[in-house]
Image: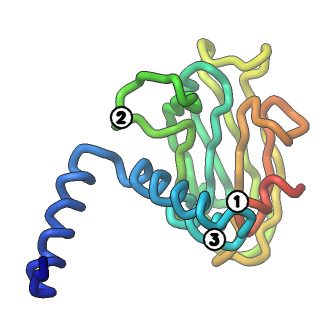
Amino acid sequence: MWLPADRYIGSLQQMFHQYTDSTSRRRFLAGGGAALIASTAGCTSIIDGLADLALGDVNLFNETGTVLTGTLTITDPSDETVLSESFELPPESTDDDSSDEEEEDGMVAFEDVWTGSGAYEVTVELDSDSEIQGESTASAAIRVDNTDEEMLAIGFAAEGFDDTIGFRVAESLSGFAEN
């Protein structure tokens, strides 16, 4: 059956809005991304492009089995505090999780953090009930040269990080895994 273009587009928009009303933006992107990744397996640039939609300047990744709460503080090269935020970071879900669909999947992102290129000081302080393997604080001096492209990943018990609370700067999601 043939539909005029404006009716077809309207129907698609209505279906999209119904879907996104009950599902978070990131879950929608992740689902669409998974389908796209499955059809183009091995294409890192597509994966990185999709990840850029959900990632910010600073990204927290929780690979523990529990919710982590704490505070993140970042000072810029001129020693100004550019981010001082409390966070509640849900654990990464697994396929057999039956948790609320609205809950984000083990990550929190912060936008518009970098003020210029240079050295930044990053400090994470977990609340006393959120310790990971006895650790509750970590800090690092990081360098950001390209404020439009570079991102910071802070991994909590994350694979590929040397420390329980690890820090890594890269230009893409795949770059976080390469270091």
How packed mark 2 is, by other alpha carbons closer than 10 Å (few <14, some 14-19, many 20 or more), is few
The numbered mark, 1 or 3, whose residue comes first in the sequence reads 3
- Residue bearing the label numbered 2: 101
Residue 46: assigned label: 3
The numbered mark, 2 or 1, whose residue comes first in the sequence reads 2
Tell us which disc is closer to us: 2 or 1: 2
- From this view, report whether residue 178 is shown above or below residue 159: below
Q: What x and y, as percent, mark residue 131? A: 69, 17
Who's the residue at 87% across and 34% down the image?
163
- Give the side of residue 166 with respect to residue 106, left or right: right
Q: Nearer the viewer, residue 131 or 42?
A: 42
The colour scheme applied to this rendered structure is rainbow
Who's the residue at 51% across and 43% down the image?
85
Q: What x and y, as percent, mark residue 96? A: 52, 23
- Residue bearing the label numbered 1: 173
Cα distance in 3D space between marks 1 and 3: 11 Å
- From this view, report whether residue 54 is shown above or below residue 88: below
Who's the residue at 64% across and 67% down the image?
40
Q: Amino acid at mark 2?
A: Glu
Residue 48: assigned label: none
Furthest toward the bottom, the residue is: 5
Q: Amino acid at mark 3?
A: Ile
**Residue 70 shows in this picture:** no
Q: Do labels 1 and 3 touch, CB within 8 Å?
A: no
